[in-house]
Amino acid sequence: MDAIRESAQARYEHRPDCSLKHPRAIIPRRLVANCRPFHHNDGLNLQPYELFIGLRYTRAKRRNHFISFISLISMLGMGLGVMALIVVLSVMNGFQKEIRARMLGASPHLEVVADGGRMQDWQAVLDAVAQHPQVTASAPYVSGQGMLSFGQSVQGVMVRGIDPARETAITDLSNKIKAGNLADLRSTEFGIVLGSDLARALGVRMGEKVMLIAPQGSITPAGMMPRLKQFRVVGMFEIGMAPYDNSLALININDAQKLFQLGEAVTGISTKLRDIDRAPEVATALQQQLPSGLYANDWTHQNSNYFRAVQMEKKMMFIILSLIVAVAAFNIVSTLVMAVTDKQADIAILRTLGASPSSIMKIFIVQGVVIGLIGTLLGSVGGIALALNLDVVVPFIENLFGVHFLAKDVYYISELPSDLRYTEVALVSALSFIISLLATLYPSYRASKTQPAEALRYE
């Protein structure tokens, strides 16, 4: 018996490092070499064995090429979803930025208006507004509605009386002039600058006279008669947005005061701010300083419906395109389920050697996370590269196929703008990684429930 015992002990040796969970487990000599990766204190290999095996399964190509192919498809699907999200969000940011720039190019960042549209002591209000540190320029203006008549054509317009010298510091209208000059709006000369679409609808040209009809009229024996005044067209502007090009007319502020019978009063004070994103904060601060009957309205309040619609559309596009990432996550689930089925024998051997169910879970979580991480990185790099070079890629595709995505005669913006924000890239990447991590939980849990005896019964 002693000889048999010594012979058996000679065929086995104690390897605490290879025993996984049981430090005194006895392991056959033929498995000693295979246990090297399990060492936690080996100077040449410091990684946990779960990470080692998970990475090994990810890059293994011997037994089942179909699983490797599905893994590749999952990576590409995840990358495609991330890239689509980044590019679409960048394009929507670009549209929002471009339209906001065009809106603020024709309108001030903040306005102070009075009840009834009549501000009497406007000079004191102008001085008070100009003292705010965020205000870089301010000017009075007169606003009112009217009708323009030329020949047989009649168009309703929004008339804005401005001081040309001060207006250049508040809006970009002087840079949008296509004909004439904004400085030609001189007092008492009754000149007018029209939007390009408005001039085209009326059929009027430079130097011709149009009839401006104001609703504020005079009482005559025949009843209330509207005020009529001839204005000479001294300029035309084109902003690229229909609400301005179709219905905005500019005249001198003194001429507007006479036309609307305001005397020395004005409609309000327009201002330009250093930081347009702080407009609501500045409006709140000014409102506390203004006397009763005066109100501060910033550009976000004036165009609130539009920007809310854009934000809602952006959120919906984010949710819809996130489904692409979700589909890729389902591919990860199917990949891991097939991998678990394929590795039943390996799982049983690991369990026999002492691996715990949590260790088996970690192995397949590593495999799924690697697939999701590589796909997320590929998608992030591709999305950033495409978003930054969209102005080159889109014209190339249009020239290649002979199409034009945004026709100039239909859309305000005829080119696809892009505004890449790295905070959104980080958000999309984090979301993709979390989805891929969640996709690994069920297959990994299923692998941890494998019974060694059942798995090795037919091996």
Image (spheres, grey):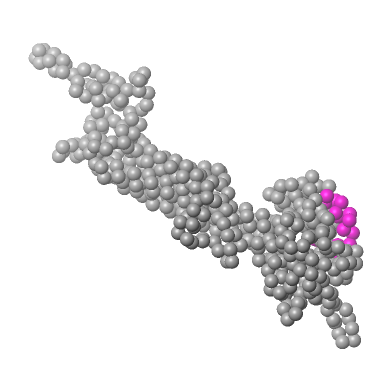
Q: Tell me if residue 153 can be seen.
A: yes
- Residue 107 location, x and y as percent? 73, 58
Indicate left or right for 31 with 310 as reference. Answer: left
Q: Quadrant of residue 123?
A: bottom right
Q: Nearer the viewer, residue 75 or 124?
A: 75
Indicate left or right for 405 with 115 as reference. Answer: left
Residue located at (58% from left, 66% from top): 410
- Residue 79 location, x and y as percent? 42, 46
Q: Please identify the quadrant where the C terminus is shown.
A: top left
- Residue 161 location, x and y as percent? 81, 64
Magenta-drawn stretch contains 124 = yes
Q: Quadrant of residue 46?
A: top left
Q: Please identify the quadrant where the N terminus is shown.
A: top left
The vertical placement of 122 against 15, above or below, is below
The vertical placement of 443 against 254, above or below, is above
Q: How many marks?
A: 0
Q: Magenta residues?
A: 113-130
The vertical placement of 432 against 236, above or below, is above
Magenta-drawn stretch contains 218 = no
The secondary structure that most of the magenta stretch takes on is: helix
- Residue 446 location, x and y as percent? 30, 43
Residue located at (55% from left, 63% from top): 407
Residue located at (85% from left, 82% from top): 224
Residue located at (87% from left, 67% from top): 189
Q: Quadrant of residue 207?
A: bottom right
